[in-house]
Image (cartoon, helix red, strand yellow):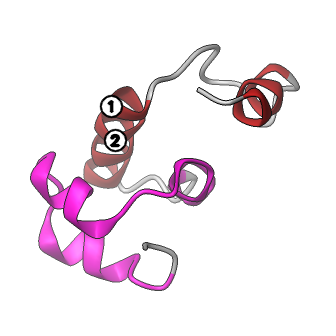
Amino acid sequence: MGKAKKRSLHLGINDRFSNLSRTEAIKTVVEMLKNGDRDVYGLITLFGLSAEELLEAGGSYEAVKGLDSILL
């Protein structure tokens, strides 16, 4: 994880996580999508996740397609 991401997480921008890898972030985003949590936008943009990564991790096509505007 880069310095800027560590700093952002340390400052409390995303209070749920203290140290998060890209793989863990993908799994967390998929779980948040399944639960219908809309706070997922910050985590997607922080890590620059793609639609392909979310679909491979088990995200539903409809949920990922709904986020099309912010995904790479």
Q: Is residue 26 magenta?
A: no
58 and 1: which is toward the camera:
1
Q: What residue type is labelled 1?
A: Thr
Q: Which residue lies furthest to the bottom in this view?
A: 69
Drawn side of residue 59 relative to residue 47, left or right: left
Kindly indicate the quadrant of the structure image that contains residue 54.
bottom left
- Residue 63 highlighted magenta (yes or no): yes
Magenta range: 40-69
Quarter placement of the C terminus: bottom left
Q: Left or right: 54 with respect to 56?
A: right
Circle 1 sits on which residue? 23
Question: How far across and how far down the image is residue 67, in percent?
Answer: 41, 76
**In the rendered view, does 42 fall on the left or right side of 60?**
right
Give the structural element (helix, strand or loop) at label 2.
helix
Task: Label 1, secondary structure: give it.
Answer: helix
Q: Residue at x 45, y 24 (%)?
A: 21
Q: Residues within 10 Å of mark 1 (few under 14, many from 20)?
A: few
Residue at the (37%, 56%) spot, across then down:
36
Vertical comparison of 24 with 55: above or below: above
- Report the residue at 35% width, 81% height from top: 66
Which amino acid lies under the numbered mark 2 shown in the image of this protein? Ile
* Circle 1/circle 2 CB separation < 8 Å: yes
Q: From the top left corner, tell me how far across and down residue 68 is, in percent.
A: 39, 82
Q: Name the residue under label 2.
A: 26
Outermost residue on the top side: it is 18
